[in-house]
Image: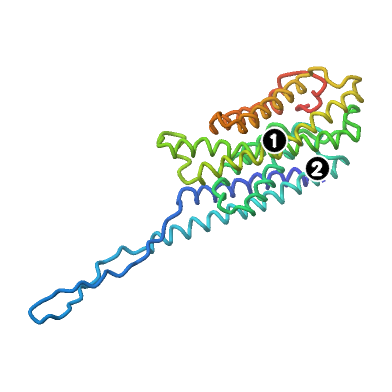
Amino acid sequence: MSALSDNLVLFTTLAYLIAMIGHAVEYALGNARTRVEVAAPVRELVGAGGGVVPTPPAPVPSSAPADRSAARARLAGLIGVGATAVAAALHLGALVTRGFAADRMPWGNMYEFVLTVTFIGVAAWLVVLWKRPSLRKLGLFLTLVMVLLVATAELVLYVPIVPLVPALNSYWFVIHVSTIVFASGIFLFGAVPAVGFLMRNGYEQGKRSFPYTLAKRLPGAAGLERLTFTLHAFAFPVFTFAVIAGAIWAEAAWGRPWGWDPKETWAFISWVVYAGYLHARATPSVKRNVATWIAVLGFLTVLMNLFGVNIFFTGLHSYGGLD
């Protein structure tokens, strides 16, 4: 089962790469508009005989090249979506087989945690895409993130399966870690439309420098901003519960609910930043791009808690690192 899980992670990475290429082709081709051929109006020429002389219609450029380009773009986008769905299925298979091989939930170390967070993120994306197909062009950026994170997990973070340390051998392991993983996965997905909104908003304001030009084929800024808010408003209560559950578990395991361990500290920082984003988003005097920058900062604190704390700091949560 362990070897099967490892192979499935490899195939998952390749499938995400294929999906990213498909989305990139659609993004490059863009939405070619079909030009409708309209017959030229008949003009009356009054001559000596008083007859009506129709003038031949002016030649209209053929729309065939644009039609073919649009068809190719749509096909590439559908291939990207299909490959993303296949990658998500392989991704889930890798997690399930890893769990069976370990005889526990597959969240016991940094490698497994990253794999689970990324799966939640792509699963959420597929649900949103099913509801709102117009957001398909976000798939390029989402699959890019998936390729980077899953490949990093596979190449850098991989550790063999080992039993849980005694501190994790509790039903709180399922309660706390499942909720923190779920919230982190939604925050991961939420960061994609957040960055997309910042680029698209600049493009709509007339900015034509990099990276704003990357957003010219993204959906409208207003829709991206609403999606960003919806995802964060959904994930934040789950994240709050996860922090509270962690404090209860810490009381049971270590005899104190909070000790400013590095991971606890950064979890609190993330909570404060995301709370600040939701407050700023609800404040009419705060511009939407300012509030969205706070959301992006929140995700950077999540990455710091996931990678920086586990790699560079030592604390009671060090069992989640690379060892």
Judge left or right: residue 236 versus residue 288. Answer: right
Q: Nearer the viewer, residue 41 or 65?
A: 41
For marks 1 and 2, the one nearer the N-term is 2
Give the Cα distance between marks 1 and 2.
Answer: 14 Å
Judge left or right: residue 46 versus residue 212. Answer: left
Q: Position of residue 315 (x, y in %)?
A: 80, 19
Q: Residue at x 79, y 37 (%)?
A: 179
Q: Residue at x 40, y 37 (%)?
A: 206
Quadrant of residue 244 within the rendered picture: top right
Figure quadrant of the C terminus: top right
Compared to residue 47, the image places residue 75 above or below, namely: above
Task: Answer few, some or many: residues within 10 Å of disc 1's Cα (few below 14, many 20 plus, some between 14 and 19).
Answer: some
Q: Residue at x 75, y 31 (%)?
A: 110
Q: Secondary structure at mark 1?
A: helix
Q: Residue at x 50, y 45 (%)?
A: 220
Q: Position of residue 52 (x, y in %)?
A: 17, 78
Judge left or right: residue 202 versus residue 109. Answer: left
Residue marked by disc 2? 98
Q: Secondary structure at mark 2?
A: helix
Judge left or right: residue 264 versus residue 75. Answer: right
Residue marked by disc 1? 153
Amino acid bearing label 1: Ala
Compared to residue 209, the image places residue 53 above or below, namely: below
Amino acid bearing label 2: Arg
Q: Position of residue 76 (x, y in %)?
A: 53, 55
